[in-house]
Structures are given as structure tokens and as C-alpha cells.
Image: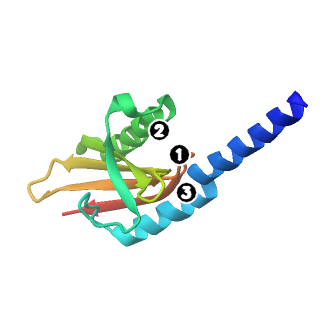
Amino acid sequence: MITMLLSVLLNLASAQQLELFPLPVESQKVMTEIAAEMGEYFDVGFALESYALEVMSSGDMSAALKTKVDSLIEKRNEDLYPKGGVYEAVVYKVVNKNNGSLAGYIVYIKDYIDHALWDGSGVTVYLAINLVVVDYVPFSA
């Protein structure tokens, strides 16, 4: 009897958890749609109908997310070496306004190039909740 009750409670908890936390496939779809809607020039003020963007501090990030962000920055630095590098990276979590569930992350990386005509550049990386890159959008001013 107790075993059956525990089983029912665990199944209920699992069902509720699935509603609050999207599966990676759903997250990838949402983040792909957000990337397409944002376009080349990411803007935190861009009005997303169903999702809110929240800046994350390094203390808010999981170890896995920190590692992913560090690897994205390192890759960008390698791509720009020896003429430039990353000077700023901001991580946003994308949250569903209706139920508060996490949809994914946006990593906004700004970089510099040592050239007289350089006027700003970088990359916006869209990550699903399982930290898979769903879109990688370079930009330049």
C-alpha cells in the first residue's frame, strides 16, 4: 500500500515537472524561433510575446553553463587571434512568462578587432536547456 502510494506520488511529481520544465527538443524549437525572431542584431529590449530575458550573474549559473560559456568565449578569442578578442559576454536566461519555466539561454558576446574601421562586432549564441547550440549568429556594426 505504501509502495503504491509512493509510486503514485512520484508519477504525479514527474508529470508536474514535465509541465514546468520543457524537454530539450521543445527548448531547441523555442530557442530556434527566438533566434529567428531576434535576427542579426540582438536587443535585450526586443519584445518577446511569451518570454522574458533575465541577466544571469556567474553565481546564478550552473557549473555546466559556466563551462559552456567559457568555451564559447575561448572559441571566439581563437577565431579573432591575433587581431582581436572578446571584451564582454552577457548571459541571459529565457523564461516563459506564463509558467516561469526555463526555455534556454542566450550568450551575447561582444568583441573587438584591431582595425581603424572596426565599429563593433560579436556573436549571439542561442542555447537549449541541455546547452546544445541551436543558433550562432555573428553581427557587426
N-term-proximal mark, 2 vs 1: 2
Left or right of residue 26: residue 107? left
Q: Badge 2 local density, few (<14 within 10 Å), some, or many (20+)?
A: some
Q: Which mark is residue 27?
A: 3
The amino acid at mark 1 is Leu
> Label 1: which residue?
131
From mark 3 to mark 2, how far is it between C-alphas? 17 Å
The amino acid at mark 2 is Lys
From mark 2 to mark 1, how far is it between C-alphas? 7 Å
Of 141 and 133, the residue lying toward us: 133
The amino acid at mark 3 is Ser
Is disc 2 placed on a helix, strand or loop? helix
From mark 1 to mark 3, how far is it between C-alphas? 10 Å
Q: Which mark is residue 43?
A: none
Query: In the image, residue 58 lies at what x, y percent?
Result: 34, 31
Of 89 and 79, the residue lying toward us: 89
The quadrant of the picture occupied by the N terminus is top right
When the figure is inspected, residue 131 is found, relative to residue 140, above or below; the finding is above
Discs 2, 1 touching: Cβ within 8 Å: yes
Going 77% across and 43% down the picture, which residue do you hit?
A: 11
- The residue at the far left in this view is 116
Between disc 1 and disc 3, the foreground one is 3
N-term-proximal mark, 1 vs 3: 3
Left or right of residue 97: residue 54? left
Is disc 3 placed on a helix, strand or loop? helix
Q: Taking the image as drawn, is residue 43 in sight? A: yes
The quadrant of the picture occupied by the C terminus is bottom left
When the figure is inspected, residue 141 is found, relative to residue 56, above or below; the finding is below
> Label 2: which residue?
68
**Location of residue 43 (image quadrant):** bottom left
Is disc 1 placed on a helix, strand or loop? loop
